[in-house]
Image (cartoon, rainbow, N blue to C red):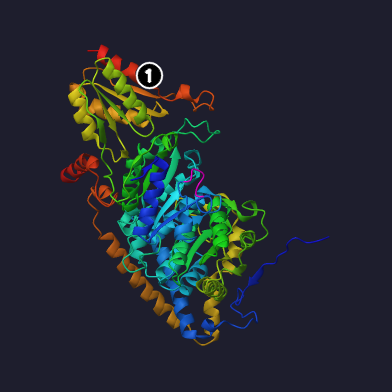
Amino acid sequence: MAQITLIEAVTQALAYEMRNDESVVVLGEDVGVNGGVFRATQGLQEQFGEMRVIDTPLDEATIAGLTIGLAVQGMKPVAEAQFEGFIYPMMEHIACHAARMRNRTRGRMTVPAVWRAPWGGGIRAPEHHSEANEHLFTNIPGLRVVMPSSPARAYGLLLAAIRDPDPVIFFEPKRIYRQYKEEVPDDGEALPLDVCFVLRDGTDVTLVTWGAQVKECLEAADELAQKGISAEVIDVATLTPLDFDTIAESVTKTGRCVIVHEAPKTAGFGAEIAARLAEECLYSLLAPVQRVTGFDTHIPLFRLEMKYLPSVERIVEAAERTLAAS
Amino acid sequence: MSIAAKFEIEYLQYLDQDGKETGKELPAFAKDLDHMVELYKLMVSTRVFDAKSIALQRTGKLGTYASCLGHEAAHVGIGSAMRREDSLAVSYREYGAQLYRGVKPREVYTYWGGDERGNDFADAPAHDFAWCVPIGTQCLHAAGSALAFKIRKEARVAVCTIGDGGSSKGDFYGAINVAGAQQLPMVAVIVNNQWAISVPRRIQSGSGTLAQKGIAAGLPCIQVDGNDIIAVRAAMEIALERARSGQGASVIEAVTYRLGDHTTADDARRYRGEQEVKDAWERDPIPRLRKWLEGKGKWDETKEEAWKAECDDWMDNEVNAYLETKNQPATAMFDYLYAELPADLEAQREIVASLDRTS
C-alpha cells in the first residue's frame, strides 16, 4: 500500500467521495486545471469533468454563496478557500446562512457543505497566508469546525465532513501537508466527527491540541518522558461540537492540563477549554491550567513566524510548570 | 475613434400610468383577459394583506414588518411568470410573488411575528428560499441553485430579486458575474423602488440605469416599468425561457416606487418630500390595471367590492390562524440546529427545557 502525505490524503478522500456520490462537487479558485495551489484537487477535473470540479471567478463571497445554493438544492459541494486568510469574505454566507439555514427554516432547507481551507503558519508564506482563525468559527452555532493532524485523519475526517448533513469548516494545517507520509487505505472508511483522539496515554499531564501542533505536542511528550514525566496527548480534531468528555476524563486522571494552539491567546479556542475545565473539573486539578499559544499579535511575516508559533520547548516548560505546582 | 464596446438598454412598457396601451403589441398572456383578472386580483389581495400586516404591527401583534406597498405589479409579475419547479430567492418584501407561489399570509405573519416556523412553507415550493435579510446575499444563493440545475441538466431556473440598494452589493455583482461566466439558468430582477431606507437612487449608483449593470457581466438586460405588470411579466417570460433553454442569465430592472416606509420601524417623512410621494401615487400599479380591465369590460366596482370583501375574509382567517398559533417549546432553538443534537449541547438544552417547565 502506498504511503501518502496529508495533502494526498485530502485528494484521495475527495476522489473517493466523488466516485461514491455523484452529488459531490468541488469548487473554488484554481481547483480545476491547476489542481489547487497546494494540489489538493490534483487530477480531479480530468477524472470528473468541468461540471464537477469547477473553477470559479476570483471572488470568495461568490464561492461561499454558490456553495450554499448548491447545497440547498441537493448537491454536496466542497468549496476551497485558497488560504484561511482569504476566508473573511465568505464569513457572511457561512455565519448568516450556512450555519443557520436548517434552524431558521425548521429543517426545510439544509446546507450539507464543506469549506476546506489551508490553515496556519510556518511555511514562509506571504502576508495573509498564515493565519490561525479557527476561533472565529467555533463561536458560530450550527457549524462543525474540524482540523485533521495526520494523513489518516485527513482522509477519514474529510469523508465524514462531506457525508455530514450539516456545514463543516475543514481547516487543513498546511505546515504538515507534506511533513510525513503514512499508509492510508483508500477504503472509504470515515472517522467519527465530534470526538477527540487520544494519541498518547499518560498519567501526569494532559496536552490538548489540534492541527499542526499535534506534532510538537507528541515531541514534547517524548522529551517529558525522558525527564520521567508521563504526558497524555489529545488531538481535539472536531473543535465544535466539542467532545469535552474525553478531555475531562483525561484531566481528571492527570490533574494537569496544557492547552496548545497556534491562534492568539485571548479568546482563542483554548480559552473555552480552560473555562470548561474550571467549570467542570476544578477539584480534579492539581495545578493551574496552562496555555501555550500564538501571542496576541498578528503572526509576523516569515522571518519571525517561528518565534510566534508554539514550540516544543515552550510546551515542555508549561508542562513542567504544572508539575512544579504540586 | 475605434469603439471597444457600446450598449443600449431597452425600456419596456405596455400600459401607461392611466391604463392606456402604449401601442406595443400585447404579449400572448395579456390577451387572456381572464388570466389578467386573476393577476389583478392577486395584486389587490397583496395590498389588502399588506395593510393587514401593518395594522397587526401597529396593534402590537407583529414585530417589525417590511411593507410591499406599491410593488404589487413587480412582485406578482415575477411570481406569475415562474414555474413551480423554478426556485425563488427573495429579499424580504416580495409577498406578491410569494403568495402566487403558495406562501400563506399566516406564514409571513409568523415570520415577522418572531417565529421561525414562518420560513417552513407548507404549500410553496420547498426549494424556494426564505426571506433574506443580509442584503444581496440571496443573489448568490440563486446562482448556486442555478449551478445545481445546470449540473443536473434540469430545465429549471433560479430567480433572485434585489433592491436598488442591494444592487450596490458585491454579492449582486458576484452573482451576475458568475452567471455570465458559467451561462447559468438565472434571472436577476432589480426591483428599483428608488429608496434604500433613506438613501435615494440618485446617490446609490452613478449607473445610468441599474439594468446596465448586467452588461459588464455579459448578460442581456432590460429596464421595464415596474408598475406595469404586463411589462414585468413579459420581460420575465423572455428571460425565463432564455435561461430554461440553456442560453444563460438575464438582468431585469423593474422601476417602481416604495409608497410606504422601509419597514414599520422607519419613518420616510424624515428623508423624502410629500410631493414626490404624491407623484408616485399617480403611478400606482393597481388603478392602471383596473382601468385597463374596466375598459375591456372585465372589471367593475361591484366586482372590486366583492373581491375586496373576499380578501378581507381571507386575511381575517389567516390572521386568526396566526394569532392562535402557540409558541414553540423553547427547546426548539436547539432542535433544528443540526440534523442530530450534538452530545455537548444536551446540557444546555436541558437548561432551556427546565425554563419551559417553570414558565
Q: How many marks?
A: 1
x and y, in percent, of residue B239 in the image: 55, 71
* Image quadrant in which you'd find residue B189: bottom right
Amino acid found under the numbered disc labelled 1: Arg
Q: Viewer-proximal residue, A194 or A277?
A: A194
* Circle 1 SS class: helix
Please tell me whether residue B315 is drawn above or below residue A280 in the rendered image: below
Indicate the chain on which mark 1 is placed.
Answer: A
Horizontal relation, residue B302 to residue B177: left or right: left
Q: Main secondary structure of the magenta part?
A: loop
In the rendered image, the residue lying farthest to the right is: B1
* Image quadrant in which you'd find residue B295: bottom right
In the rendered image, the residue lying farthest to the bottom is: B297
Q: Is residue A291 among the parts visible in the rendering?
A: yes
Q: Viewer-proximal residue, A68 or B61?
A: A68
x and y, in percent, of residue A113 in the image: 38, 52
x and y, in percent, of residue A315 in the image: 35, 21
x and y, in percent, of residue B6 in the image: 73, 63
Horizontal relation, residue B248 to residue B151: left or right: right
Q: Residue at x 28, y 21 (%)?
A: A289
Is B16 inside the magenta-drawn segment?
no
Q: Residue at x 36, y 40 (%)?
A: A151
- Residue, disc 1: A314
In the rendered image, the residue lying farthest to the front is: A1
Start and end of the magenta stretch?
A: A35-39
Q: Is residue B92 among the parts visible in the rendering?
A: no
Is A38 inside the magenta-drawn segment?
yes
